[in-house]
Structure formats: C-alpha cells, structure tokens
Amino acid sequence: MTAPPVAHKHLDLAVVGNCEVNALIDIQGRIVWMCLPRPDGDPVFAALLSTGQGAAPTGVFAMDLEGQVRAEQHYQRNTAIAETLLYDNAGGSLKITDFAPRFRKHGRMFRPMMFVRIVEPLSGRPQLTLRLRPVSEYGSKVQVPRNGSNHVGFSTGELSWRVTSDAPISSLTGERPLVLDGPLTFIIGPDEAVEEAPAVLALRLLEETRTYWQEWVRTLSVPFDWQEAVIRAAITLKLCTYEDTGAVMAALTTSIPESAGSGRNWDYRYCWLRDAYFVVQALNRLGATRTMERYLHFIDHIVAQSSVGALRPLYPIVAQGELTERHVTTLEGFLGMGPVRVGNDAANQVQHDVYGAIILAATQLFFDHRLVNPGTETLFRQLELLGDRAIVVYEQPDAGPWEFRGMQKLHTFSATMSWAGCDRLSRVADRLGLAERARLWRTRADAMRERILERAWNEQRGFFAATLGGDDFDASILLLPELGLVPATDPRFISTLDVIGRELGSGDHGSGDLLFRYRHADDFGTPETSFTICAFWYVNALAAAGRMEAAREQFTRLLERRNPLGLLSEDIDPVSGALWGNYPQTYSMVGIINSALRLSRTWEEVL
C-alpha cells in the first residue's frame, strides 16, 4: 500500500457554487472537478479523479503561469468567492477570481448554471497558457470545441454549454501562450449568447454575489469564539445543498478513498436523511432556517411517493436521479487509487434510523415562531406513521450508521434514533394540545428507552455497546446524550466516554485529537484513518460531561486539522495529517459549528 501524500495537499481545494452547481479549484487555480448540469451529473472537468500527464491533465480548465514559483489561495471574506494568486520567477503575478453567481433578482434567487472566472495581472508581465480540456461520460470522451466569434461551445448528450470570453478564442482552443497585460473574463454557462461585454457582466455578477453572501452571513447567529471557522463551515454547508429540490448532499465528490489504496471509495453526491438532519440542525442553530424548510419540502415529496416501510437511507437530489452503483473504468481515481464509483448501493440497505431522522428534522416546525409555515396537526399525523414504523423496527437488525455491506446487527444508534422520533412526537403532540396522543407517545417512548438502555449497557465491560446485547463499542454511542437518551453525566455514559477516548483515540492511551469510528475489522478490513466527525462528537460529549477545559483543548487542535481554506473532508490520517475521503464533507463541517456553539464564551461574557 502506498504511503499517503504530504498532509492534505491534494485536498487543498476551494469550493465555489451557488446551490445549483459547484466546482473544485486547486491551489494552481485549475478547475479539477465540475459536474453539469447538477452536482450529481457527468463531470466536464474530472482531473481530480485522473492521474493525467504534465501540468494540466485532460478534464481541467487551467491557467498555467510560465515560470511559476509560488501559489496562494483564499476566499474573499465571508463569501463563496475564491481567489488564487500565482507568482512567477521574474517578479510577475496574477489573480484568478472564481465564483458562481447567486443573488436575489426579480423577487427570486438567481442561481444559474454558471461559473465566472476573472484573471488579472498584479505585477510584471505574467505569461500564461490557457488549457480548456473538458470531457464527458466520466472521462471516456474528450469534448470537441465549436469556435464562435467570442465563445467556445461544447455538446454532450442533452447538455450544451459554452465558455464566453474576451480572451482570444485561439488561445483557448490552441493553448498558445499569451502575455497577460489586462484582465480576462471567462463565463461558463448554457449554450446561449451573452449580450453584455463579458467583463462588464462579470463585474456586476461579482458585486451582487459578494453582497449576497456577506448579507447572508450577517443573518447568522454566530458564537463569539471561532467566528471565522463557523462562518466558513456554514457557507460550505450551504454550498452542499441543491436548492431546486431542497436536498442536502453528503459531499460534492465521488470516490476519494477513505485511506490510501483502501478501496473504500464511495459516491457521496446524494442526500442521506441522517446526514441531512444534522446539517439542517446545525444551520438552524445559526438561524439559517430556510435550508430546513427547503429540506422538509424534499422529504415531503419522498414520503408522499414511498410507502412508510420502503423509505431508503439516501436519495438522489432530483426525483429522476440514478442511484444504482457502478464502476467507471475511464477514470483512474484520486491519485490513481480506484475504483471510481457512480451511484451508491447503500440506498438499498436497511437503515432503521431514517424514521427518527425525518421526525427530528420536522420537529422544529412545531416550535420555531420564525418559520413562515409552521407545523400543523395534519403534518403531525403523517409523522405518527413514521413513529409507528420506528416502534416496529427499533429492535430489528440493520446496516447501521456505518453502512456495513456484509452484515446486519441490532445497532444501538439506530434504536436510539427510533426512540428519539417517538420522544419528539410526544413533545409535538403536547405542543399542539393533543393530550391523549402526547401521553400515548410518551408511554411508548419511555418503554423503548428503558429497553434500549437495558440491552445496550454491557455490565461486564462497563460501557454502552454499539449493538444491543453486544460486546463492541463505536463512536456513534457518543451521540446518546445529544439525542436525549441518557444524560452525559450518567455514570454509565461517563464510563463509556472514558473507554471510547482510550480505545478509539488516535494516539497512545487516548491521546491525540482524532477519533476512529471503530477499531474492529469490517467488509474492507481494519480502518486506517480517523473519521473526522467522531472527533467533534467526542468534544461535545466531553463538554456535556463537564470536562470543558479538555473539550476546548481538543477542539482547538481539531481546527488546526482544516486545510488552508478552512475545510475538512471525511477522514484524516492520524500520522501524516492528510485529508482523505469525500470533500467537503458536510458531517465534518457540522462538527465545527456544533462544537463551537457549545464551547464558545457568550457575547455577554466578553463585551
């Protein structure tokens, strides 16, 4: 097995988007991943999963600076606008500004299938070569350009798109070097004429998009401490939503392995009901409630079109999307580490936590007076059907939160999510003044809670087990207090917390800031990298148990694990610090927000 690369360098990628489309841009200013017409679509730039040859492999939009010696990348403050600075060995430098337009227009959100790139000289006479090399059908075909007077067009299947520019078209298609003596603009979008001068249009879109993101950030109720980290996490979570349907994607990529050469390569460009609940919960805590409202619209469509017993753990971001998993042989994989998978067979798994996840996501509708459309008794009756199903399945085996492909067990987390759904139904019924239903659901939830605690507690080994009646433990048990099943100060949980810290921590005897989800072998062997969100669960559990100083120290170290853009992937190598797994991982960004909110000093304490 090959050694991992230097810490997270290959996932130092800026994410730009507008909740309709997204792109990933590397430290050289190259677009290395962009799917059209949606984030789950065919990548027109797929260099992220192609080893390629030379400075700019196929499936990339690059602006290669002659004699480059240094590169920097950052976001414009409080925005999703990325800037890449490149420096050459002759004192020349340039700046590449990348964004996807998003702002309110004519009473609606303007979020087209469009990206804007602006490259401008900062010093000297930088010389660059433009390389526009799109592909189709997951890298199997190189798209052939159609030259226009001021654009280059491409067509693949039902998709037609173009790059409109004020740069010489020959420099785009011929890859001829040019001296950058003034700004150049590139507008990637539908195959339609751009009526304005590209530079004029780009600057107007840039200003309006900057204003949108800065105003959106102003609406967030951020904690006093770690504001920058929370803001970047919130923007990133927003970018992982597909606003047209309300779906929340687990990540924007497919097949970034969880560790080097592991084969743990999955397609995460879909909506997991469990993950989405934690995302909308985190954004709700910041006051960004519209994402939750759109997500519940997405859920409403799913429930309306499925029988209660047939709910899946994940769904495509649009109704007609494809989930059937297949291997793509035309892309080599991230750093050459295949396989590349499209689709995800986890959609066919039995995961019983889905019923609780939907109820938990909907609960806030009944309590939050800020929402335009509050929860109604009709919605409550629909949620009761999910609660009925949760009671039936909570003591039945499933694939669990880690989506084991070769086994099913009675997972404590799944049972707890089922209990949490029934517990919240009691609270909602009480809120609606339905006393009889409130008592009924309270009785049911209390019986489930007693049964789960009895079966999950392993007296002999002194911890809550990962499975009911089991002997192993995993990091999902850290969520029991978060979900309300047991107080974090309960001696049984304290004992479990100590065991998890000692046995799953990334260092010797529980030292280190990272946490493995479990240590035992699974379908692919023994995990080699830590699971990022688990470390944040541990931080929150420490804080809830009263170990605030230790929690803050752990959290501070965790923030240092972010890449230079403030983002995290799914997994981290505890030895090298390299980021692995799909990117950016919503679960991981949720961890930043939740831990910061729990640990921060209040504004009143400081000001």
Image (spheres, rainbow, N blue to C red):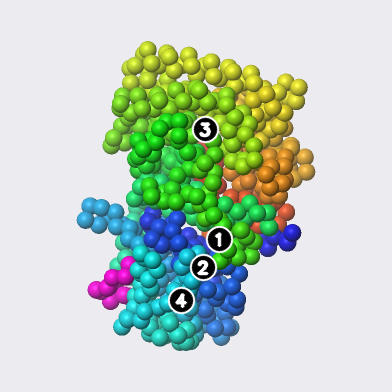
Neighbourhood count class around disc 1 (C-alpha, 10 Å): few under 14, some 14–19, many 20 upward: some
Neighbourhood count class around disc 3 (C-alpha, 10 Å): few under 14, some 14–19, many 20 upward: many
Instruction: State how far apart marks 1 and 4 are (Cα).
Output: 23 Å
Is 522 placed above or below 326 here? above
Residue 116's x, y, as percent?
Answer: 38, 68
Q: Earlier in the sequence, mark 2 or mark 1?
A: 2
Q: Amino acid at mark 3?
A: Asp
Neighbourhood count class around disc 2 (C-alpha, 10 Å): few under 14, some 14–19, many 20 upward: many
Residue 438's x, y, as percent?
Answer: 40, 16
Q: What segment carries the magenta color?
A: 189-201
Assign a secondary structure to mark 4. Answer: strand
Residue 281 lies in quadrant: top left
Which quarter of the image is occupied by the N terminus? bottom right
Q: Earlier in the sequence, mark 2 or mark 4?
A: 4
Mark 1 or 3, closer to the camera: 1
Instruction: State how far apart marks 2 and 4 are (Cα).
Output: 14 Å
Task: Reply yes or no: does residue 191 show up in magenta.
Answer: yes
- The answer to whether mark 4 and mark 3 are in CB contact below 8 A is no
Q: Which mark is residue 353?
A: 3
Q: Which mark is residue 132?
A: 4
Q: Which mark is residue 62?
A: none
Q: Earlier in the sequence, mark 1 or mark 4?
A: 4
Q: Which mark is residue 328?
A: 1
- The answer to whether mark 1 and mark 4 are in CB contact below 8 A is no
Residue 535's x, y, as percent?
Answer: 63, 42
